[in-house]
């Protein structure tokens, strides 16, 4: 299945949902239409029970360069209410990515800057080509990467988060991995193949177990130790009752 949602391409390829930012002539810069259609694509992916993983990529040389010039101009001229509505659409996209029952993997080539870096950070996993670049340069124009800060702070230490958002510097893929922003860095020439191999790993594990693990991991952020253990107990019981677990135990016992 393949569909085109304006500036976003969506396809289902076996167990993989593929979402592509498709504004290569604008370095896949974010605007209202792209955020809207990106949200639509993720909702579509959420409805496909055969999908085990969703990969987000950018067409052309860059993953996403942040907000485009027209979007920035609109922000500078908008009322408070208009800015609230505009910001809320990005908030809803971030929450949608985190609530999808399958992992969302950002496969980053080229630049992921400002809102583009925020979009990658919002994904569950980030794979980067060796030459990829990351950064939050918003402070250079008096802006703040405010919503993504809630996610960034869960990825890196407080001091590293402070440095990233207040200096506005670009970092390379290896440094991003060292800081905790990136999971894996692959050589440029082998990047497409190694991304596919990585995605294929999710076909070998239980879809329901991954979905429950994702749900619990993000739920635990605001819980005390005792609350976290009790949440884990509840989900442990739910996992035991799933068809995947029942079948998995039966297969394991049959080998003994």
Image: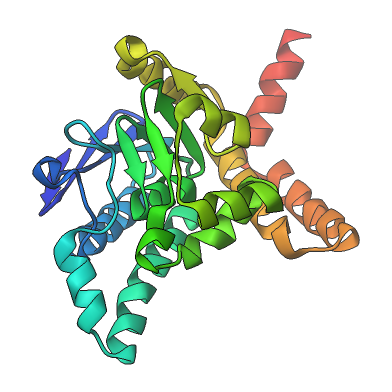
**Residue 246: x percent and y percent?**
67, 34
Front-most of 12 and 5?
A: 5
Q: Quadrant of residue 111?
A: top left
The color scheme shown is rainbow
Front-most of 108 and 228?
A: 108
Q: How many labels does the image show?
A: 0
**Residue 211: x percent and y percent?**
56, 45
The residue located at (39%, 44%) in the rendering is 49
> Which quarter of the image is occupied by the N terminus?
top left
> Which quarter of the image is occupied by the C terminus?
top right
- Please state if 177 lies on the left or on the right of 85 as rendered: right
The residue located at (53%, 57%) in the rendering is 166
Q: Specify whether residue 221 is in view.
A: yes
Front-most of 135 and 40?
A: 135
In the depicted structure, whether residue 195 falls above or below residue 30:
above
**Residue 9: x percent and y percent?**
17, 44
**Residue 77: x percent and y percent?**
21, 83
The residue located at (13%, 47%) in the rendering is 26
- Please state if 89 lies on the left or on the right of 168 as rendered: left
Front-most of 159 and 71?
A: 159
In the depicted structure, whether residue 8 falls above or below residue 74:
above
Q: Specify whether residue 215 is in view.
A: no
- Please state if 229 lies on the left or on the right of 192 as rendered: right
The residue located at (14%, 66%) in the rendering is 70
Q: In which quarter of the image is residue 170?
A: top left
């Amino acid at each position: 299945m393949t569909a085109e949602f304006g500036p976003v391409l969506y396809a289902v390829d076996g167990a993989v949902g593929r979402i592509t930012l498709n504004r290569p002539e604008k370095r896949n810069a974010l605007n209202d239409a792209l955020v809207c259609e990106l949200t639509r694509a993720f909702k579509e992916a959420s409805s496909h029970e055969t999908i085990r993983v969703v990969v987000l990529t950018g067409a052309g040389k860059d993953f996403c360069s942040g907000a485009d010039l027209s979007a920035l101009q609109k922000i500078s001229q908008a009322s408070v209410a208009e800015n609230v509505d505009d910001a809320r659409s990005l908030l809803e996209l971030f929450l949608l990515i985190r609530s999808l029952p399958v992992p969302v993997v950002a496969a980053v080539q080229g630049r992921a800057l400002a809102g583009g870096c925020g979009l990658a950070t919002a994904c569950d996993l980030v794979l980067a080509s060796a030459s990829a670049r990351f950064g939050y340069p918003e402070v250079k124009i008096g802006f703040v990467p405010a919503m993504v800060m809630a996610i960034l702070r869960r990825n890196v230490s407080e001091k590293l988060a402070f440095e990233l958002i207040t200096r506005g510097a670009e970092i390379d893929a290896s440094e991003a991995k060292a800081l905790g922003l990136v999971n894996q860095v692959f050589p440029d020439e082998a990047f497409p193949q190694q991304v596919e191999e990585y995605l294929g790993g999710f076909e070998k594990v239980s879809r329901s177990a991954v979905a429950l693990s994702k749900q619990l991991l993000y739920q635990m952020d605001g819980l005390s130790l005792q609350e976290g253990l009790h949440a884990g107990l509840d989900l442990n019981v739910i996992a035991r009752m799933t068809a995947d677990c029942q079948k998995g135990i039966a297969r394991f016992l049959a080998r003994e």
